[in-house]
Image (tube, rainbow, N blue to C red):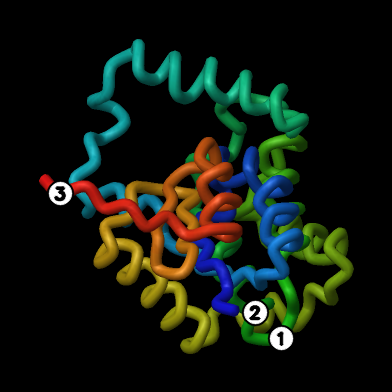
Amino acid sequence: MNPIEYFYAGYSGYAYLGSRRFMEIANAAGRAIRHRPFDLRYLLDHNGSQPFDERSEAYGAYHFVRQIERWSEYRNMPVARLNPTYHGNTIDPSNKMLIAAVELGHNIDELSCIMMEQHWRYDVDLADLSALQEIARLAGLDPAPLMERLDADSVQATYDANTAEAVKMGLLGSPTYIVDGDMVYGQDHLSFVERALEKPFTLCIPN
């Protein structure tokens, strides 16, 4: 069976809120997950999205306040701050650590969940290399080999390829799940992922 393609950024709030439920769905279906960390900020600058600072206050209040509050409670995924203290810092080291772990042969399902939890539940700075090392330890991994590979050419190449693929496929944001070629955007649509794993969607309505 094909793995589920999982496009996300390690600091993504909505990826965090759906992370544990997504793992449950994938495990129940017996599907592996192919992690595809990518540069979300680059995608949003190149996919036609309206810049955040140009969106209305009403949009921000609903999508980035009330929706996060509701999903946090609904999925029992605690959030310390609606706008984490270090959320504006570089997102590259955390994404590249995930890729480095994959290159070293690790299953990073737990690492990715812990990384997002540390940022959103405990307000940890994912640009802080010492914090990333502690995250690796929490996931049961030796941080030293991961840190050594952060700047490896192969890691950067994979990061760039994931980002380019996200742009090429027209992804809307993080998280995005690809089930046997069928794209599902947003953790609020994980029920579609679950259904697609049980029975693929086939209906195509003509324009």
- Label 1 and label 2: CA atoms lie apart by 5 Å
Using the image, determine if residue 112 lies above or below residue 11.
below
| Label 2: how many Cα within 10 Å (few below 14, some 14–19, many 20+) | some
The amino acid at mark 1 is Gly
Give SS at disc 2: helix
Q: Check if mark 1's residue and mark 2's residue have beta carbons within 8 Å.
A: yes
**Quarter of the image with the C terminus in it:** top left
Secondary structure found at label 3: loop
The residue wearing badge 1 is 105
Q: Between 42 and 184, which is closer to the camera in this rendering?
A: 184
Q: Which residue is mark 3?
A: 206
At 33% from the left edge and 48% from the top edge, which residue is drawn?
172
Q: Which residue is identified by label 2?
A: 102
- Left or right? Give the position of 82 relative to 120: left
Residue appearing at x 67%, y 37% in the figure = 120
| Residue type (three-letter) at the residue carrying disc 2 | Val
Residue visible at 38% across and 74% down in the picture = 160
